[in-house]
Image (spheres, coloured by chain):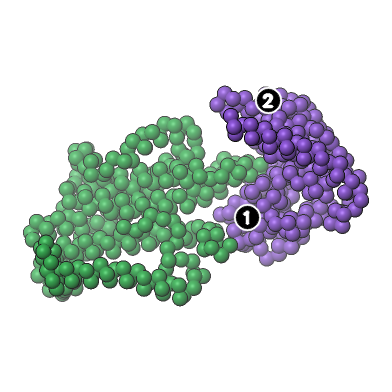
Chain colours: A green, B purple
Amino acid sequence: MAAPTSLPGPGSGPAGARPAARWIAFFQAMLGISIFFLSWFLLVDVFAVWRFAQLPKLSVSLREMFSPDPTFGVSVFTKEYYDHLQASAGRVVFAFLIAVSAGVVIGILSGWNRWFRAVCQPLLELARPIPVLAWIPLVILVMPSRESAVIALTFLAAFFITILNTMLGVRSIDEVYFRAAQSLGFSRWAILRHVVIPGALPFIFVGLQIAMAACWFSLVASEIVSGTAGLGYKVWEAYYYVQFETMVIMILTLGICGYISSAIIRRLGAYLMRWRGKTLGGVA
Amino acid sequence: MSRGALSFRAVRKVYDPEGKAVLALDGVDLDIAPGEFCAIVGPSGCGKTTLLNAVAGFETLTAGAIQLDGRTIATPDASAAPGEDRIVVFQNGALFPWRSVMWNITCGPVMQGRMSEREAREHGLKLLARVGLKGCEDKYPNDLSGGQKRRVEIVRALINDPAVLLLDEPFRALDALTKSVMQEYLLELLVQFPKTVFFITHDLEEALFLGDKVVVFTSRPGRIKEVVSVDIPKPRSHEVLTSPRFLELKAALSAVVHTEAMRAFEAGEKEMAR
C-alpha cells in the first residue's frame, strides 16, 4: 500500500529535482518490484516449493493476462476485463468524491467551530476504528440495491478518514495566522477562504491519500460480499471457479489502480501546495 | 502627525489557567505620543507580549483601560476586537505562506475596501522597491530569507496605514548582521511613513538604538520599572552604538534589566522545583 504521506516521494518530486536522483529512485523502485516477482517465479514456477505449488504460476498468469484468447475468458484484450475495471473504478471515484466533498465540509466546520467539534469528535473517534467490514450487513440491510450497498461501504471508508484529517488540518493552523487575518480586517468568509482552507490543505491531502487506499480496500470487501461485477467480485468468482490466473490478473489490476489513483492525488496536492516546495525540498 | 496617541491606564491582566490565577500585568500606566517609538524591554514572561496583544485586540483586560487617540480600545467590559488601525508584526512572522508576497501585502487594504486591487498592487510594488525587494512580488514567502520575510511583513503592516505599529520581537530569529540591517531599514521606513511604534524586545541595545523612549518592565507580574527618554537625535546610524551618550544610557539601564532578568530566572527555578 502506498505510504500515506503528503511529501512528494522520490521520482514524483518537484520539477527541479536532479534528473540523476530521479533515475536512481526509479531503479530502486524497479529493484524492489523485481525482487518480488522473481521470488514468485522461483518459488512457484521453477522450484514449486511446498505450499507455493498451489499458487498460479507467474509465467502462466502473465501469458493469460496478455493473451488475445485467454483460457478463462479474461485478459487485457477482452471486453469483460474492462467491464469489471470500469465497474470498480466508477464506484471508487463516485464514492470517493462524495465522501471527500462531505468530509471536507464537515471536517472544516468541526475544526473551526468549537461547539460543532464538541458534538462531532467523540462520535467520530468512536466510528472511525470500526472496520468497514463490520458495517457490511447493516449497510446491505438498509440500502435498496446491491450496487448502492457497495458504493455506500466504499463511501464510509473514505468519509471518516477525510473528516478527521480535515479537522486536524484546521486545528494545525497556527493561531498567529488567524490573528493576522483579523487585524488586517478579513471577514469570516475571507478567513475561511484564505486561511482555513489553504492552511488545512496539507493535512487534507494526507487524508485523501489514506482515504483513497481505504476506498479500494472496502470496495473489494464489499464487492466480494455483495457485488455483481467489479474487480473484487471477479477475484472471488475466479477463486470459486478455480480460475486462479484470472484471480492474479484482477489482483495486479487492483494494485495498479490503487497506485494510479494515489499518484493522481499526490500530483494534485503538489500542484495546489506549490508554496511548500522549497521548504520541503530541503533547499531553503 | 496627530494620530497614534496611545495611553495605558492602570492596566491589569490576570490569567486563570486551571484555576491558578497568574498575575501577568499590574498597574501599567504609560503614555506614548503620536509618532513616538516606544521600546519595551523586560525579561521573558514579564507580560510584554500580553500588553501588546491587549493593544492589538487579541486579549481582554482584567482591569484598566487602553486608549488610542482618545478612543477606548481595551477595557474589561468589552470583548477584544482587533482592528486595522493597529497592525502587528509577529515574533515568528505571520505571512500567509500559501499566498504570494504581493497577495500578502495587498490583502489588507483590498479586503477593507480602501484600495482597488490595482491601486494596492502599485502601492505594494513601490514599497517593495523601497525595502530592496523588487522582483519578489510573485514569490511565495518560503522562497525568501528570514530578513526578506520581515521586510515584507513590515511593508504589509505599513500599507494599512495603521495608527500604531505593534512589533513583537520582530528581529529575534535573525542573525546579528541581518538584524542590524533590518533595524536601519525600519528606522528609514519610519522617516518616510511616520508611525507610533510599540516595539517589544529583550535586547536592551536594540531598544536604545531604535527607541525614542525605552520602558523597562519588571519580571512577572509585569510592572513598569523605569522609563527613559533616549535623547540621541534621529536619524541614527550604527555609529551611535559606540557613542558616549549611548553607552552611558546602556550602562544605566543594563543593571536594571539584569536585576529583573535574574529575578525572573529565580522565580522560574522556584516554579520548576515546586
Q: Label 1: few (<14), some or many (≥20) within 10 Å? A: many
Q: Which residue is mark 2?
A: B62
Which residue is at 68% across, 37% downward? Answer: B265
Snapshot quadrant of residue B224: top right
Amino acid type of disc 2? Thr
Chain ID of residue with mark 1: B
Per the rendering, the mark at residue B103 is 1
Mark 1 or mark 2, earlier in chain: 2
Please rate how many residues cluster around mark 2, counting C-alpha atoms within 10 Å: few if below 14, some from 14 to 19, many from 20: some
The quarter of the rendered structure image containing the C terminus of chain B is: top right
Letter of the chain that mark 2 sits on in the rendering? B
Q: Give the amino acid at mark 1.
A: Trp
**Front in this rendered view, residue B134 or A79:** B134
Q: Relative to A164, is A276 on the left or the right? A: right
Give the side of residue A21 with respect to residue A186, left or right.
left
- Respond whether the residues carrying marks 1 and 2 are from the same subunit: yes
Q: Nearer the viewer, residue A143 or B271?
A: B271
Q: Is residue B222 left or right of residue B251?
A: left
- The image quarter in which residue A284 lies: bottom right
- Label 1 sits on a secondary structure element that is helix
Disc 2, SS: loop
